[in-house]
Image (cartoon, rainbow, N blue to C red):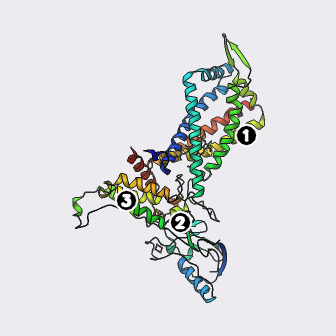
Amino acid sequence: MDLKLKIWRQKDSQSRGKFVNYKLNDVSPDSSFLEMLDVLNEELVERNEEPIVFDHDCREGICGACGMVINGRPHGPDSLITVCQLHMRKFKHGDTIVIEPWRARAFPLIKDLMVDRYAFDKLIQESGFVSVNTGSAPEANSIPVKKHYADLAMDAAACIGCGACVAACKNASAMLFVGAKVSHLTLLPQGKIEAKERVLQMVAKMDELGFGNCTNTGACEAECPKGITLTNIARLNREYYYAKV
Amino acid sequence: MSTIFTSSIGKKLMMSLAGFFLLAFLLVHLGINLLVIIYDDPMVYNKVAHFMGTNILVKIFEIVLMGGILLHIIYALILQIQNWIARPKRYSKANYSNTSFFSKFMIHTAIITLVFLAIHFADFYFKAKFGHTETLVVDGVLYHDLATEIVDKFKMLPFVVFYIAAFIFLGFHLVHGFQSAFKTYGLDNSRFTPVIQALAIVYSVVIVGGNTMIPLMIYFS
Ligand code: HEM
Ligand code: SF4
Ligand code: FES
């Protein structure tokens, strides 16, 4: 199929970016979205132009490195997948595809479609962990966990930190990400001990990093490739109030 | 403790509590105003209005209500401005995927409501308090004839249209506001939330329906 691509190009964080139009012919419907961009980049290199910069690593939907807004939707038109898992059969011959980077003050642009998501790492460094003594691991069966909580914690732990929730949110809020991290740790006995400090520190850090405020719109949940639900945001709110009283 | 007023979640909680208080108030307000169309005798409404205008508890409640409105507006504006700052560069294509639709227009419906509130206060509240209204003396007590005032207002078509339009936009604000407040309080799960969402629609339909019925029935009577 032949496609028209409208891609955001920006030299570096300082310069003004703009959309550049490209034509790409004979795209295989079986190729992935990133492969389609690889093909375009090869053409660009052959024409002695700068290739388009975008993040990617595993290309199997588990690392969270890839991410771009395609026709207004983070990770593109399909649900519950990252952009590396998106296939060109989702598009039609003659389509125009608009590709933009994640846009948020907390995720400054590095180049083209690549943004700096270090803010997420800072959130994890702040308190997104469980302090343990190093040494031998405890016997797993000595810490009983209710199935219900184990399931909820596993669901929350599926977050890969891709940032689509921030990109999708009209307020660039990180509540879904922080909600997932707080949930998966706090629901388990090992994480309960530091639950109060954790939620207070992570929320304070989240505000400091310049993310917006949640308005329960649900765009994050709709675009999250890992199906993290809004209930994690409600749990984050609960944990926060609980830590306050 | 202090960050409960300044953190993102804390500010949201304050706005939400004030907003929920306003939701409760709107029901009471509607209940009283329905008296104008339920009873032909304007004195029923006038007596209630007289009670509301003189009772000390109601006066205290009035101050609380003004505080609630201010609190809601101030926190909402701070949150909204921060939210705009958090996304300095907008997307060229808007994303309307599966989300709470009216939540995207809360600030817009809010500003329409604010304009309406200003006009509404100038029209009824301040007029009843400080302005000139017709008075009636019944059993030796002086009443402002507010019921007739309302009926006169709603005989004017532009006023009726404006009033109804304002309530429809407020209704959009309430559909999202009602259910969003529960999430803000941390109450959200797959069984509970659909019930709340249905209640939000019922509540908004009652408020918008009731408040449009009043001008319509007066205009066509
Ligand atoms: C009687 C009138 C009003 C009622 C009953 C009301 C009620 C509510 C409720 C319940 C919420 C949701 C709180 C939450 O998400 O937790 C809300 C949100 C909001 N309200 Fe109001 N409100 C009213 C008037 C206003 C006015 C006059 C403004 C003026 C600026 C305003 C601005 C906002 C904004 C900006 C939001 C945030 C929406 C969001 O979360 O995206 N509201 N309102
Ligand atoms: S919550 Fe979902 S959208 Fe947000 S970072 Fe995690 S995986 Fe990505
Ligand atoms: S490249 Fe790893 S999730 Fe897409």
- Both labels 2 and 3 in a single chain: yes
In the foreground, B70 or B186: B70
- Residue under circle 1? B162
Displayed quadrant of residue A128: bottom left
**Looking at the picture, do discs 1 and 3 lie on one chain?**
no
Say which of marks 1 and 3 sits in front.
3
Residue A228 image label: none
Q: CA distance from mark 2 to mark 3?
A: 24 Å
- Disc 2 crowd, CA 10 A, few/some/many (<14, 14-19, 20+): many
- Mark 2 and mark 1 in contact? Answer it, CB < 8 Å: no
Rendered-image quadrant of the N terminus of chain A: bottom right
In percent of width and height, residue B16 lies at 52, 43
Q: Residue B56 falls in which quadrant of the image?
A: top right
Residue located beneath label 3 in the image: A184
Please, what is the three-letter code of the amino acid marked with disc 3? His
Element type at marker 3?
helix
Report the side of A182 relative to A84 (left or right).
Answer: left
Label 1 Cα neighbours within 10 Å, binned few <14 / some 14-19 / many ≥20:
few
User: Callout 2, which amino acid?
Assistant: Phe
Residue marked by disc 2: A107
Residue located at (46% from left, 47% from top): B3
Check whether the beta carbons of the residues at disc 2 and disc 3 lie within 8 A of each other: no
Q: In which chain is the residue bearing label 3?
A: A
**Direction from residue B60 to residue B127 in the image, left or right:** right
User: Are the residues tagged 1 and 3 within 8 Å (C-beta)?
Assistant: no
Residue B220 appears in the rendering:
no
Q: What amino acid is found at the position of numbered circle 1 in the picture?
A: Phe
In the foreground, B214 or A194:
A194
To which chain does the residue with label 1 belong?
B
Discs 2/1, front: 2
- In the image, residue A76 sits, relative to residue B170, either above or below, namely below
Circle 1 SS class: helix
